[in-house]
Image: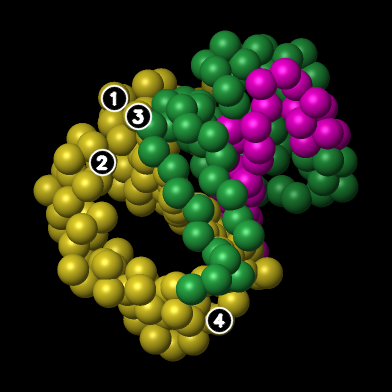
Chain colours: A green, B yellow
Amino acid sequence: MRVAKPVPSVAVIFISKLQLQDEAYAESITRLKELGGQQPGFLGIESARAPDGRGITVVFYDTAESARVWGKNPEHRSAMKTGQEKWYEYYELYYANVVKGHAWSSDAGT
Amino acid sequence: MRVAKPVPSVAVIFISKLQLQDEAYAESITRLKELGGQQPGFLGIESARAPDGRGITVVFYDTAESARVWGKNPEHRSAMKTGQEKWYEYYELYYANVVKGHAWSSDAGT
Protein backbone atom coordinates (compact mmCIF):
# COMPACT_ATOMS: atom_id res chain seq x y z
CA MET A 1 0.00 0.00 0.00
CA ARG A 2 1.18 3.46 -0.91
CA VAL A 3 1.38 6.08 1.84
CA ALA A 4 1.38 9.83 1.13
CA LYS A 5 4.16 12.02 2.50
CA PRO A 6 3.18 13.98 5.62
CA VAL A 7 1.24 17.25 5.24
CA PRO A 8 2.19 20.00 5.85
CA SER A 9 5.66 19.56 4.42
CA VAL A 10 7.98 21.25 1.97
CA ALA A 11 8.54 19.98 -1.58
CA VAL A 12 11.63 20.91 -3.53
CA ILE A 13 10.84 20.39 -7.21
CA PHE A 14 13.80 19.97 -9.55
CA ILE A 15 12.91 19.91 -13.26
CA SER A 16 15.88 19.30 -15.53
CA LYS A 17 17.21 18.15 -18.84
CA LEU A 18 20.51 16.33 -19.06
CA GLN A 19 22.79 16.86 -22.03
CA LEU A 20 25.37 14.39 -20.71
CA GLN A 21 24.87 11.25 -18.61
CA ASP A 22 28.32 9.95 -17.79
CA GLU A 23 29.64 7.69 -15.04
CA ALA A 24 30.54 10.67 -12.86
CA TYR A 25 26.91 11.85 -13.03
CA ALA A 26 25.60 8.44 -11.95
CA GLU A 27 28.12 8.32 -9.09
CA SER A 28 27.21 11.85 -8.01
CA ILE A 29 23.48 11.06 -7.93
CA THR A 30 24.07 7.89 -5.89
CA ARG A 31 26.24 9.80 -3.43
CA LEU A 32 23.83 12.74 -3.11
CA LYS A 33 20.85 10.45 -2.55
CA GLU A 34 22.75 8.70 0.22
CA LEU A 35 23.92 11.94 1.79
CA GLY A 36 20.62 13.80 1.39
CA GLY A 37 18.63 10.87 2.73
CA GLN A 38 20.53 11.05 6.03
CA GLN A 39 19.78 14.73 6.54
CA PRO A 40 17.51 15.73 9.44
CA GLY A 41 14.06 16.62 8.17
CA PHE A 42 14.30 14.53 4.99
CA LEU A 43 10.93 12.84 4.35
CA GLY A 44 11.36 11.20 0.96
CA ILE A 45 12.46 11.52 -2.64
CA GLU A 46 10.69 10.71 -5.91
CA SER A 47 12.46 10.86 -9.23
CA ALA A 48 11.73 10.02 -12.86
CA ARG A 49 13.84 10.58 -15.95
CA ALA A 50 12.74 9.97 -19.53
CA PRO A 51 15.12 8.44 -22.10
CA ASP A 52 15.47 11.86 -23.81
CA GLY A 53 17.12 13.27 -20.66
CA ARG A 54 14.16 15.21 -19.23
CA GLY A 55 13.69 14.49 -15.54
CA ILE A 56 11.79 15.58 -12.47
CA THR A 57 12.84 15.01 -8.87
CA VAL A 58 10.71 15.97 -5.89
CA VAL A 59 12.30 15.93 -2.42
CA PHE A 60 10.10 16.27 0.64
CA TYR A 61 11.26 17.90 3.89
CA ASP A 62 9.60 18.61 7.20
CA THR A 63 10.37 22.34 7.09
CA ALA A 64 11.70 25.05 4.79
CA GLU A 65 14.75 25.25 7.05
CA SER A 66 15.64 21.58 6.38
CA ALA A 67 15.30 22.21 2.64
CA ARG A 68 17.50 25.30 2.94
CA VAL A 69 20.21 23.41 4.84
CA TRP A 70 20.44 20.79 2.08
CA GLY A 71 20.54 23.56 -0.53
CA LYS A 72 23.65 24.92 1.19
CA ASN A 73 25.39 21.58 1.73
CA PRO A 74 28.94 21.95 0.29
CA GLU A 75 29.00 18.56 -1.45
CA HIS A 76 25.56 19.26 -2.93
CA ARG A 77 26.64 22.70 -4.12
CA SER A 78 29.81 21.31 -5.67
CA ALA A 79 27.73 18.75 -7.60
CA MET A 80 25.35 21.49 -8.79
CA LYS A 81 28.34 23.45 -10.07
CA THR A 82 29.55 20.44 -12.05
CA GLY A 83 25.97 20.01 -13.21
CA GLN A 84 25.99 23.49 -14.70
CA GLU A 85 29.38 22.95 -16.30
CA LYS A 86 28.72 19.51 -17.78
CA TRP A 87 25.50 17.66 -17.16
CA TYR A 88 22.49 19.95 -17.46
CA GLU A 89 21.08 21.63 -20.54
CA TYR A 90 18.64 23.45 -18.28
CA TYR A 91 16.89 23.16 -14.95
CA GLU A 92 14.18 24.78 -12.88
CA LEU A 93 14.12 24.67 -9.09
CA TYR A 94 11.06 25.40 -6.94
CA TYR A 95 10.38 25.46 -3.22
CA ALA A 96 6.76 24.79 -2.35
CA ASN A 97 4.66 24.31 0.78
CA VAL A 98 2.60 21.14 0.52
CA VAL A 99 -0.91 21.77 1.85
CA LYS A 100 -2.74 18.64 0.70
CA GLY A 101 -1.67 15.11 -0.18
CA HIS A 102 -3.22 11.82 -1.12
CA ALA A 103 -1.93 8.38 -2.08
CA TRP A 104 -3.72 5.64 -3.97
CA SER A 105 -2.59 2.15 -4.93
CA SER A 106 -4.18 -0.71 -6.79
CA ASP A 107 -3.32 -3.15 -3.99
CA ALA A 108 -5.13 -1.13 -1.32
CA GLY A 109 -8.38 -3.04 -1.77
CA THR A 110 -11.48 -1.76 -3.49
CA MET B 1 16.78 30.70 -22.32
CA ARG B 2 14.74 28.95 -19.69
CA VAL B 3 12.22 31.02 -17.73
CA ALA B 4 10.88 29.97 -14.31
CA LYS B 5 7.14 29.73 -13.71
CA PRO B 6 5.67 32.73 -11.85
CA VAL B 7 5.91 32.88 -8.07
CA PRO B 8 3.70 32.72 -6.09
CA SER B 9 1.82 29.97 -7.86
CA VAL B 10 0.32 26.56 -7.11
CA ALA B 11 2.00 23.30 -8.11
CA VAL B 12 0.03 20.10 -8.42
CA ILE B 13 2.48 17.22 -8.15
CA PHE B 14 1.37 13.89 -9.58
CA ILE B 15 3.72 10.97 -8.85
CA SER B 16 2.66 7.71 -10.46
CA LYS B 17 3.58 4.30 -11.71
CA LEU B 18 1.87 2.85 -14.76
CA GLN B 19 1.15 -0.84 -14.98
CA LEU B 20 -0.36 -0.54 -18.47
CA GLN B 21 0.49 1.91 -21.26
CA ASP B 22 -2.02 1.26 -24.02
CA GLU B 23 -3.25 3.39 -26.91
CA ALA B 24 -6.22 4.62 -24.89
CA TYR B 25 -3.82 5.92 -22.22
CA ALA B 26 -1.77 7.84 -24.79
CA GLU B 27 -4.95 9.31 -26.30
CA SER B 28 -6.27 10.27 -22.88
CA ILE B 29 -3.03 12.07 -21.96
CA THR B 30 -2.99 13.97 -25.25
CA ARG B 31 -6.61 15.01 -24.77
CA LEU B 32 -6.15 16.03 -21.12
CA LYS B 33 -3.05 18.08 -21.90
CA GLU B 34 -4.99 19.93 -24.60
CA LEU B 35 -8.02 20.46 -22.39
CA GLY B 36 -6.07 21.33 -19.23
CA GLY B 37 -3.81 23.71 -21.13
CA GLN B 38 -6.82 25.83 -22.15
CA GLN B 39 -8.06 26.20 -18.58
CA PRO B 40 -8.00 29.67 -17.01
CA GLY B 41 -5.14 29.93 -14.54
CA PHE B 42 -3.02 27.24 -16.19
CA LEU B 43 0.64 28.33 -16.16
CA GLY B 44 2.52 25.29 -17.46
CA ILE B 45 3.09 21.55 -17.26
CA GLU B 46 6.26 19.51 -16.86
CA SER B 47 6.28 15.75 -17.15
CA ALA B 48 8.81 12.92 -17.19
CA ARG B 49 8.26 9.19 -17.28
CA ALA B 50 10.97 6.54 -16.98
CA PRO B 51 10.91 3.37 -19.10
CA ASP B 52 9.86 1.33 -16.03
CA GLY B 53 6.58 3.25 -15.83
CA ARG B 54 7.42 5.62 -12.96
CA GLY B 55 6.50 9.18 -13.79
CA ILE B 56 6.16 12.64 -12.31
CA THR B 57 4.01 15.45 -13.66
CA VAL B 58 3.94 18.95 -12.19
CA VAL B 59 1.20 21.35 -13.29
CA PHE B 60 1.44 25.01 -12.33
CA TYR B 61 -1.62 27.22 -11.73
CA ASP B 62 -2.10 30.84 -10.74
CA THR B 63 -4.28 29.98 -7.73
CA ALA B 64 -5.51 27.04 -5.64
CA GLU B 65 -8.98 27.70 -7.06
CA SER B 66 -7.77 27.12 -10.64
CA ALA B 67 -6.13 23.86 -9.54
CA ARG B 68 -9.35 22.83 -7.78
CA VAL B 69 -11.47 23.54 -10.86
CA TRP B 70 -9.30 21.26 -12.99
CA GLY B 71 -9.44 18.58 -10.30
CA LYS B 72 -13.22 18.59 -10.62
CA ASN B 73 -13.38 18.70 -14.43
CA PRO B 74 -15.69 15.82 -15.51
CA GLU B 75 -13.48 14.61 -18.37
CA HIS B 76 -10.44 14.71 -16.08
CA ARG B 77 -12.29 12.79 -13.35
CA SER B 78 -13.46 10.19 -15.83
CA ALA B 79 -9.86 9.66 -16.98
CA MET B 80 -8.68 9.34 -13.36
CA LYS B 81 -11.34 6.67 -12.80
CA THR B 82 -10.10 4.71 -15.82
CA GLY B 83 -6.58 5.29 -14.49
CA GLN B 84 -7.47 3.56 -11.24
CA GLU B 85 -9.19 0.70 -13.05
CA LYS B 86 -6.52 0.05 -15.67
CA TRP B 87 -3.44 2.21 -15.99
CA TYR B 88 -1.97 3.02 -12.58
CA GLU B 89 -0.25 0.72 -10.14
CA TYR B 90 -0.12 3.61 -7.69
CA TYR B 91 -0.08 7.37 -7.52
CA GLU B 92 0.44 10.23 -5.10
CA LEU B 93 -1.13 13.64 -5.58
CA TYR B 94 0.00 16.82 -3.81
CA TYR B 95 -1.13 20.42 -3.84
CA ALA B 96 1.63 22.87 -2.95
CA ASN B 97 2.10 26.63 -2.80
CA VAL B 98 5.22 27.65 -4.68
CA VAL B 99 7.12 30.29 -2.72
CA LYS B 100 10.43 30.42 -4.58
CA GLY B 101 11.52 29.55 -8.12
CA HIS B 102 14.60 29.76 -10.28
CA ALA B 103 15.52 28.72 -13.81
CA TRP B 104 18.95 28.11 -15.27
CA SER B 105 20.01 27.14 -18.76
CA SER B 106 23.34 26.47 -20.40
CA ASP B 107 22.54 28.90 -23.24
CA ALA B 108 21.86 31.84 -20.91
CA GLY B 109 25.49 33.01 -20.88
CA THR B 110 27.78 32.92 -17.88
Q: Is residue A52 magenta?
A: yes
Q: Earlier in the sequence, mark 4 or mark 1?
A: 1
Chain of the residue under the numbered disc 3 shown in the image = B
Residue B5 % position (x, y): 33, 34
Q: Earlier in the sequence, mark 1 or mark 2?
A: 1
Mark 3 crowd level (few <14, some 14–19, many ≥20, 10 Å Cα): many
Alpha-carbon span between mark 2 and mark 4: 29 Å
Q: Which residues are magenta?
A: A31-60
User: Image quarter for residue B97?
Assistant: top left
Q: Earlier in the sequence, mark 2 or mark 3?
A: 2
Compared with B16, B86 (above or below) is: below
For badge 1, the amino acid type reads Pro
Q: Mark 1 and mark 3 in contact (Cβ < 8 Å)?
A: yes
Do badges 2 and 3 share one subunit?
yes
- Checking the image for residue B97, the label placed there is 3
Alpha-carbon span between mark 3 and mark 1: 7 Å
Q: Residue furthest left?
A: B40
Q: Mark 4 and mark 3 in contact (Cβ < 8 Å)?
A: no
Q: Mark 4 and mark 2 in contact (Cβ < 8 Å)?
A: no
